[in-house]
């Protein structure tokens, strides 16, 4: 039985189908960038190659590389791009007839030709992209290790014609000026009237405002601080519990102080025994009489150590010095935590006295004066803003507890407004000076543009 001969039309049909698909992709490209990506990357499905680059010609200036295979964007300052631009200029100047032709390093002179081996494979194919009656739009360069055949050139000529027509669709657009689009044609008077109305609206004065995160905090709270260095043993009150003046709030671990007191007590007993012994011997021994003053001073020092450690032991119980709410974090996070002298432990505040603490981000900062109006929108009641007035604003930006760099502001609630619960969060709207609507809308974009331009 004879083997079945392969169908000689299958490769041709595959190539034809691939050509049709590439032309369809080129026609449906939504932008010149997408079309350039198709040229340098998807052409590989029809003609295998290792690298490809698309060069765009300019009528009034030197051309530039528009796309490179395997890269989302052609970096204009990359070494490969800096070599490709003069190489394309040289190859394009020699191709007066805009024919597709194989090229290699011998087509370039001096350093350009020597660098070919560093950047590209040995065999290249220069594909000019031009349309009948129109100047050449640019060129496509394909490079691989194998030579290019006449069949490859024929297929590429058909594809290049479709690429050129698709590219001409983006290059040939003539844009009208903004003034012509807005005020040209019919209804010129109506358009001018609308433009005048828009200008008048943009010149209307409005109040500049800014939004910032805010929180209800205690007004003039009392801070309970650590009386000595130690470790928190336990809390006697719960967070946000009502306490009275003199009530015990927490206790520090007494073990370290008790150990020191025990050592000091034993040292005092030894010092007193030595002093008594020297006092008895001083009656008959002059040498012991000379040491009597030293031993007495040592005993007094040990007694002072005992008194000091006893006073520390009496201070491990921290009490409230006023009535109010005991505000602090989770007690489980404090137990076993070492504290230093003066460290903030508990905040005691009057729930009937509260204010608003605002952290205005640096990017949203506006000019504010004492007494400026503030609207506070609680997260639990965003439809009922609370009225307040600004009473304090920091001059320098600091970092907030949440890691935000901004200005710390304090606002006083309006008279007669019942203060919300301390700790509630929300958003504050701050009102500044009067500005035009144009400045109000474009303040942030203008600031971003100034930073980008560097003026």
Image (cartoon, rainbow, N blue to C red):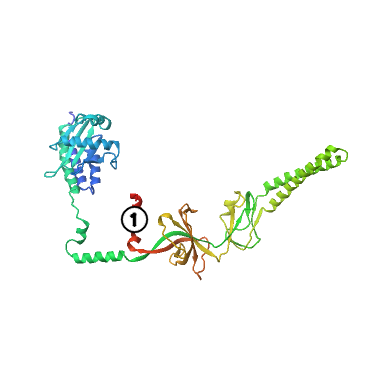
Which residue is identified by label 1? Answer: 446
Quadrant in the picture for residue 259: top right
216 left or right, relative to 440: right
For label 1, the crowd category at 10 Å Cα-Cα, with few meaning under 14, some 14 to 19 and many 20 or more, is few
Residue found at x 29% / y 66%? 200
Q: Would you say residue 9 is visible in this rendering?
A: no
Q: Position of residue 327 (x, y in %)?
A: 57, 59
Residue at x-position 30% and y-position 38%: 78
Question: Which residue is the extreme one toward the left?
Answer: 133
Residue 421 x, y percent position in the rendering: 52, 64
Q: Is residue 177 above or below residue 166?
A: below
- Residue 377 occupies quadrant: bottom left
Q: Position of residue 350 (x, y in %)?
A: 57, 64
Left or right: 189 as drawn, with respect to 242: left
Q: Nearer the viewer, residue 305 or 298?
A: 298
Side of 236 where 24 appears, left or right? left
């Amino acid at each position: 039985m004879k083997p079945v001969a392969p169908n000689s039309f299958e490769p041709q049909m595959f190539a034809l189908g691939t050509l049709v698909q590439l032309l369809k992709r080129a026609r449906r490209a939504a932008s010149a960038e997408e079309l350039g990506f198709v040229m340098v990357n998807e052409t590989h499905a029809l003609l295998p190659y290792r690298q490809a680059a698309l060069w765009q010609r300019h009528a009034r200036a030197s051309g530039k590389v528009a796309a490179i295979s395997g890269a989302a964007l052609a970096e204009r300052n990359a070494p490969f791009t800096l070599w490709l631009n003069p190489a394309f200029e040289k190859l394009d100047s020699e191709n007066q007839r805009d024919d597709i032709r194989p090229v290699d390093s011998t087509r370039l002179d001096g350093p350009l030709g020597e660098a070919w081996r560093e950047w590209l494979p040995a065999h290249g194919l220069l594909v000019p992209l031009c349309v009948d009656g129109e100047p050449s739009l640019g060129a496509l360069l394909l490079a691989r290790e194998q030579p290019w055949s006449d069949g490859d050139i024929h297929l590429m000529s058909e594809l290049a014609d479709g690429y050129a027509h698709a590219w001409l669709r983006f290059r040939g657009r003539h844009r009208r000026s903004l003034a012509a689009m807005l005020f040209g044609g019919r209804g010129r008077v109506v358009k001018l009237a609308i433009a005048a109305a828009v200008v008048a609206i943009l010149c209307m004065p409005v109040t500049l405002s800014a939004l910032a995160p805010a929180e209800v905090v205690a007004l003039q709270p009392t801070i309970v601080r650590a009386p000595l260095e130690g470790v928190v043993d336990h809390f006697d009150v719960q967070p946000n519990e009502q306490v009275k003046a003199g009530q015990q709030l927490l206790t520090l671990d007494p073990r370290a102080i008790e150990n020191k007191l025990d050592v000091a007590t034993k040292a005092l007993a030894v010092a007193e025994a030595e002093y008594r012994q020297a006092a008895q011997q001083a009656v008959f021994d002059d040498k012991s009489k000379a040491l009597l003053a030293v031993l007495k001073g040592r005993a007094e020092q040990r007694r002072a150590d005992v008194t000091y450690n006893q006073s520390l032991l009496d201070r491990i119980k921290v009490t409230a010095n006023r009535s109010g709410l005991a505000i602090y974090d989770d007690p489980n996070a404090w137990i076993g935590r070492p504290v230093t002298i003066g460290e903030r432990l508990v905040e005691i505040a009057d729930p009937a006295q509260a204010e608003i603490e605002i952290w205005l981000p640096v990017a949203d900062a506006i000019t504010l004066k004492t007494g400026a109006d503030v609207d506070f929108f609680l997260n639990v009641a965003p439809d009922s803003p609370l009225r307040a007035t600004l009473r304090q604003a920091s001059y320098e930006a600091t970092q907030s507890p949440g890691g935000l760099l901004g200005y710390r502001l304090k606002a006083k609630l309006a008279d007669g407004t019942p203060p919300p619960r301390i700790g509630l969060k929300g958003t504050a709207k701050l009102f500044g000076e009067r500005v035009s609507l144009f400045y109000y809308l474009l303040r942030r974009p203008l600031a971003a543009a100034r930073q980008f331009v560097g003026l």
